[in-house]
Amino acid sequence: MSKEQTIAAMNEWMQEKDVAALYSSRERTEDELRIYELMDKALALLEAQEWVPVSERLPEPGQEVVYYFEFVGCWVGQYLGDGTNNVFGGKFGFLTDDVTHWMPLPTPPSEGG
């Protein structure tokens, strides 16, 4: 199952079960509520790992991201623009108008985990 199919299936399941109503229900067990909370978090994580075309949206100025440009591939760096231009930089310099996609960096692991 692709990531897109997984997201669609999770969204469908959560709508079908009316998760918002389940959160407020006093009849649900603590375990059931925990399952719904975890599903919510998993869905948010999956959606956060999507590539964003720079033509649709740019990162926040100064935000560290993974960015992609055709000739070299993926790099980790920082968005150096002001929200209106396509400027990304990393260890080896900066690029203007070459980056096609970006995504937020994942959350670093917690201590011991």
Image (tube, rainbow, N blue to C red):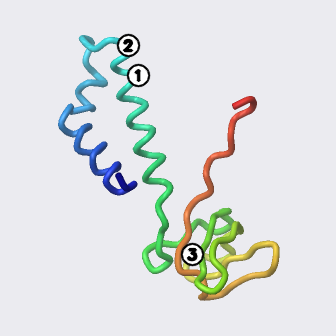
Q: Which is nearer the eye, 78 or 100? A: 100
The part of the image, by quadrant, that contains residue 14 is top left
Q: Which is nearer the eye, 12 or 5? A: 5
Asked if marks 1 and 3 touch (Cβ < 8 Å), the reply is: no
Question: Residue 68's x, y, as percent?
Answer: 59, 75
Tell which circle, 1 or 3, labels the residue nearer the N-terminal end: 1
Q: What is the C-alpha distance between the residues marked 1 and 2?
A: 6 Å
Tell which circle, 2 or 3, labels the residue nearer the N-terminal end: 2
Q: What is the C-alpha distance between the residues marked 1 and 3?
A: 38 Å
Amino acid type at circle 3 is Gly
Amino acid type at circle 1 is Arg
Question: Residue 10's x, y, as percent?
Answer: 31, 43
The residue depicted at 58 percent of the width and 84 percent of the height is: 70
| Residue 34 tag number | 1
Assign a secondary structure to mark 1: helix
Q: Which is nearer the eye, 46 or 28? A: 46
The residue depicted at 74 percent of the width and 29 percent of the height is: 112
Task: Kindly identify which residue carries mark 3.
Answer: 83
Task: Kindly identify which residue carries mark 2.
Answer: 30
Q: Which is nearer the eye, 96 or 111? A: 111
Q: What is the C-alpha distance between the residues marked 2 and 3?
A: 43 Å
Asked if marks 2 and 3 touch (Cβ < 8 Å), the reply is: no
Assign a secondary structure to mark 2: helix
Label 2: how many Cα within 10 Å (few below 14, some 14–19, many 20+): few
